[in-house]
Image: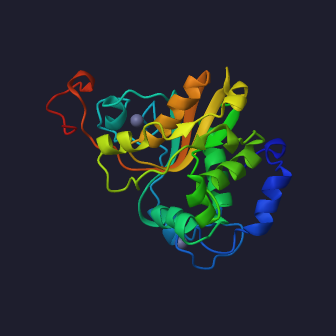
Amino acid sequence: MLPPEIRQESIKEKILELIFPGDIYCAGCGKPVERGRLYSFCDECLDSIIWANGRNCRICGKPLESWYPSDICSGCAHSVRNTDGGVVCFIYQGCVRDMIRSLKYSGRGYLARIMGQILAEKIIYEDLDFDVCVPVPMFASKEKKRGYNQAELIARFMCGFLGKPCMPELLTRTRQTKPMNRLSAAARRSNIKGAFSVPAELADEVTGRTVLIVDDIYTTGSTVDECAAELKKAGASKVFSAVMASGRNQRRLPEEHASDKDDKAV
Ligand SMILES: [Zn+2]
Ligand SMILES: [Zn+2]
């Protein structure tokens, strides 16, 4: 439970709550549940969720297996990251995948409130401090078609719980990009390269500040990383990421990070 001082919601968040009332359906499978359940999950969904509460990558927050021989996940070990740390709430599978897809494609916008609360509590648990939050932006025409940016909704609710500023305007998507889900890691990086910018007139809002990027899913990290690169270019002192769910660690480490070449990680 959050202390009362950080439960204060801005007017914007209160309006969102009126538009998207939660607590009536299971956030995972959508079946009716009684009010007051933990994050509105039914028992079956709660049992099947894989929480990212154990060892995590110290750069992106992705969960690591207990036997994995490094504190940096395979993806971060193979890349130069622009983020200074991050948190992940779940592994992207089962009802978590359904929940995120429902928010994205089925218009179940009330799920953003639940996800915002989960993310806020994770940030408190991990003691992650930041000055301003920026959701990963969507291209304007795509957002218009969907009616909302799911990352922005999650970020707004999360900031409502935390009493922190949410400023989506600090990052804009300058061009349409191909859907990422069928692209290789290298193709994702080139697809997203240069797709974001910080408006020059708002650079002062970023300079010298710690920025938290919020998104729904973290796969290879190329999107979050490109956002972080732009924010750092605009003068952000630190950039962290907070996402609902990530894929599993790919278990492959480059030589310089592997402490045991014969380990299962190869
Ligand atoms: Zn359920
Ligand atoms: Zn990582």
Q: Is residue 167 above or below residue 141?
A: above
Percent x, y of residue 169: 69, 42
Q: Quadrant of residue 142?
A: bottom right
Place of residue 159 in the rendered image (x, y in percent of width and height, measured from the top left):
72, 45
Q: Quadrant of residue 73?
A: top left
Q: Which residue is drawn at the image coordinates 82% and 58% (left, top)? A: 14
Q: Position of residue 103 (x, y in %)?
A: 57, 65
Does residue 124 appear anywhere in the picture?
A: no
Q: Residue at x 52, y 73 (%)?
A: 29
Report the label total.
Answer: 0
Q: Is residue 137 above or below residue 208?
A: below
Task: Indicate left or right for 60 with 184 as reference.
Answer: right
In this rendering, position of residue 136 left or right of residue 188 = right
Of residues 197 and 84, the one nearer the viewer is 197
Q: Is residue 203 above or below residue 190?
A: above
Can residue 251 be seen in this snapshot? yes
Q: Residue at x 40, y 53 (%)?
A: 178
